[in-house]
């Protein structure tokens, strides 16, 4: 890839589904930002192939080289906060405890739940928190 040494793949809503399909690249520090991952409508957005996307995300998170930031609001219009919280807990499961794991160790997974943020991030305080979260994470 020439002189490329690092790459950030970011996706919002449906775009976070697509971003999660891209694996860590060889010889390039690859990071992923998944914003408002659409858990609720995922089956509709993926033409009922949601399992494929979850498997890709699980493989990504299980890659010891991965660096993933997940950001979601606790007032999302499409996904209940309880669904997000359960999903995050499953992502954080130790791969060594799962028979389907592709690795025994996990990469870096940071998760930020933003109070008062909707799916569309129209709330001023939520946007400020989002920008600061991403800025700090990138540094």
Image (tube, helix red, strand yellow):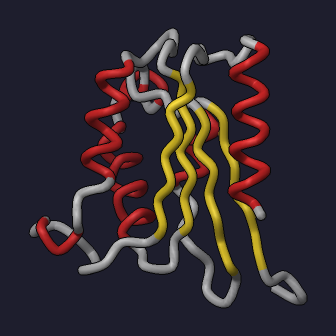
- Can you say whether 26 is above or below 130 in the image? below
Residue plotted at (57% across, 14% down): 116
- Can you say whether 62 is above or below 127 in the image? below
- Can you say whether 110 is above or below 126 in the image? below
Screen quadrant of the N terminus: bottom right
Of residues 128 and 103, the one nearer the viewer is 128
Q: Position of residue 33 (x, y in %)?
A: 63, 50
Q: Is residue 16 left or right of residue 95?
A: right
Q: Is residue 136 left or right of residue 66?
A: right
Q: Position of residue 53 (x, y in %)?
A: 41, 47
Residue plotted at (71% across, 31% down): 129
Q: Is residue 75 left or right of residue 106?
A: right
Screen quadrant of the C terminus: bottom right
Residue plotted at (42% across, 74% down): 63
Number of callouts: 0
Of residues 97 and 45, the one nearer the viewer is 97
Q: Position of residue 21 (x, y in %)?
A: 52, 55
Q: Position of residue 76 (x, y in %)?
A: 51, 15
Residue plotted at (35% across, 37% down): 50
Answer with the quarter of the image where residue 62 lies: bottom left
Residue furthest to the right in view is 3
Q: Is residue 11 left or right of residue 53?
A: right
């Amino acid at each position: 890839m020439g002189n490329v040494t690092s790459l950030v793949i970011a996706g919002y809503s449906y775009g976070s589904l697509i971003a999660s399909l891209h694996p860590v690249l060889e010889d390039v520090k690859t990071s992923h930002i998944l914003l408002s991952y659409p858990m609720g409508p995922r089956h509709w957005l993926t033409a009922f192939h949601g399992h494929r996307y979850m498997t890709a995300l699980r493989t990504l998170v299980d890659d010891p080289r991965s660096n993933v930031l997940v950001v979601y609001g606790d007032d999302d219009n499409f996904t209940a906060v309880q669904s997000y919280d359960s999903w995050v807990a499953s992502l954080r499961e130790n791969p060594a405890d799962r028979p389907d794991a592709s690795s025994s160790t996990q990469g870096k997974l940071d998760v930020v739940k933003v109070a008062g943020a909707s799916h569309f991030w129209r709330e001023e305080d939520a946007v400020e928190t989002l920008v600061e979260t991403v800025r700090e994470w990138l540094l």
